[in-house]
Amino acid sequence: MAVDPTRALVVGVDYGTLSGRAVVVRVADGAELGSAVYPYPHAVMDRVLTAGPAADAGSPVPLPPDWALQVPADYVDVLKIAVPAALREAGVDPADVIGIGTDFTACTMVPTTTDGTPLCELPEYADRPHAYIKLWKHHAAQPHADRINALAHERGESWITRYGGLISSEWEFAKGLQLLEEDREVYDATERWVEAADWIVWQLSGQYVRNACTAGYKGILQDGHYPSPEFLAALNPGFADFVADKLEHPIGQLGAAAGRLSAQAAGWTGLPEGIAVAVGNVDAHVTAPAANAVQPGQMVAIMGTSTCHVMNGSALHEVPGMCGVVQGGIVEGLYGYEAGQSGVGDIFGWFVEHGVPPIYHAEAMRRGESVHEYLTELAAQQAIGEHGLIALDWHSGNRSVLVDHELSGVVVGQTLATRPEDTYRALLEATAFGTRVIVESFQDSGVPVTEFVVAGGLLKNRLLMQIYSDVTRLPLSTIASEQGPALGSAIHAAVAAGAYPDVRTAAAAMGKVDRAVYQPIEENSRAYDALFAEYKTLHDYFGRGANDVMHRLRAIRRQATAQRPPEPGAAEPETPAADQEA
């Protein structure tokens, strides 16, 4: 049946790190008519399990360092609460909705049975950390990623070059290997190792379809093949059948329909049963169409707690430290490239929470501002370099281009005269320097970057945006929507429902962007060139093996944590297998 876009509506649902957001969008022009947000009740579990019988009894299971877990029921509640609320705010007739699309943080993994039931929802596993969802920022599989990388290079595996020479601890295989070696019982009970992006589509449609985006970028699927059973067996004999037994499944292309909305999901959402459910996708990758930035050379940075950089290229190139390159990974017919920074907004938030004295909080409150706004105002009054600091933006590790989550944050140059606004500005600049490293890696590898397009909550910080333009020497455009990923998911829903022939066409009609809002200021850029040279010196010294102190400190921390006696009434924390061997 032909779709009339003048009346048709679609719903996009963006699953972020701490909440899910639904937006109702008009197919004809991308107008956003209503939205709603639902914060996950369990948020991110990174110290103890706040779910399960032990937590209910007041003795939550402790978690080792670098863990980050979530509860799948929180995701379903987004459908039950945020989608109906968005429809109410929009004041529309749900009967006009023709499709729903979703996106997720990635790589976020759900261990399930064959029917999609998460293992943490089975009573026998409800207090087992490995039975819960491993969020993208779960970095405890770094030793396993290191082994995968070392073996891939030793064997000359061709796929490793598609990921800049290194795969991440955040991804499917590293997390799967950690599961095998740390909780074999849960590993054996895992019948499907599912990206959350695909699991939520499974809940909506009753159909399990692996999306091409996460399969390619996070699941090491290249040219139709995963790593071989022989490679996996060399890592651990018990891992040989990981792909065949738990991972391999039909692949859905981006913008296609994974299935139709089930009666159960229609009841949850208030949407018509049988409408199109788009193949799942990743929050960053759906944002490129939302910003109508799908042409080669347009790098889209989705800046929030972390930053993901995505862009299209017309040819295949190998970029050191990239997160991956996948044909059709963003839009059909082009090579989609990805890179990223593991911590950006998280770093600013950490500093405000733990590094700013009460007098600043009080002054911000008196002014009716957030502490971030107050520090930004103070920092904006400084000349470039006035604070005398250089920071490394590795508080949550380095995703690109070093791909090492054992790295940690550094601030050099502090004195007794250093004030919070000095450090805050240095951290802002550090994230811009990290982005410049990524941009230059692409440029040097034959993938030109001609425009920098920003989406996400951090684009509201005008000082930060100007710093990025000055540091990268690129014009900076901004998405003209506060709901970038959700809008992008809605665009994919429109294509899945047949309103547009492909994602590029839909992006041109529904995407929103303000071009070249910020231009590099030559005087500023010259000043930042000098500071960037110092950043690169520290970057290579600590990140490329000249001084391994950050890795040694991580090992000391893990050992100390493992030796610490548990609190009364708390379960013994699991000790990673790699630490046991050490």
Image (cartoon, helix red, strand yellow):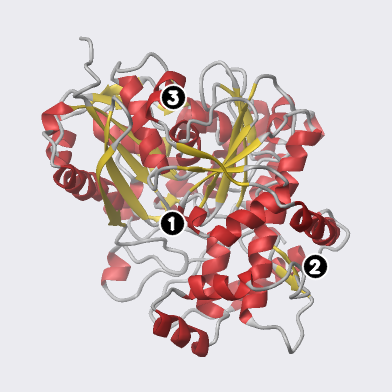
Location of residue 191 with respect to 396 vertically, above or below: above
Question: In the structure shown, which secondary structural element does the residue marked by tag 2 occupy?
Answer: helix
Location of residue 193 with respect to 131 vertically, above or below: above
Q: Which mark is residue 549?
A: 2
Q: Position of residue 73 (x, y in %)?
A: 27, 50
Q: Nearer the viewer, residue 336 or 156?
A: 336
Q: Which residue is mark 3?
A: 508
Question: In the structure shown, which secondary structural element does the residue marked by tag 3 occupy?
Answer: helix
Dot 2 crowding, Cα within 10 Å, few <14, some 14–19, many 20+: some
Dot 1 crowding, Cα within 10 Å, few <14, some 14–19, many 20+: many
* Rendered-image quadrant of the C terminus: bottom right
Task: Locate residue 72 relative to residue 245 in the image: left or right.
Answer: left
Location of residue 347 with respect to 511 vertically, above or below: below
Q: Which mark sits nearer the N-terminus, 1 or 2? A: 1
Q: Which mark is residue 69?
A: 1
Give the distance between the C-alpha atoms of the residues marked 1 and 3, in whole angstroms. Answer: 37 Å
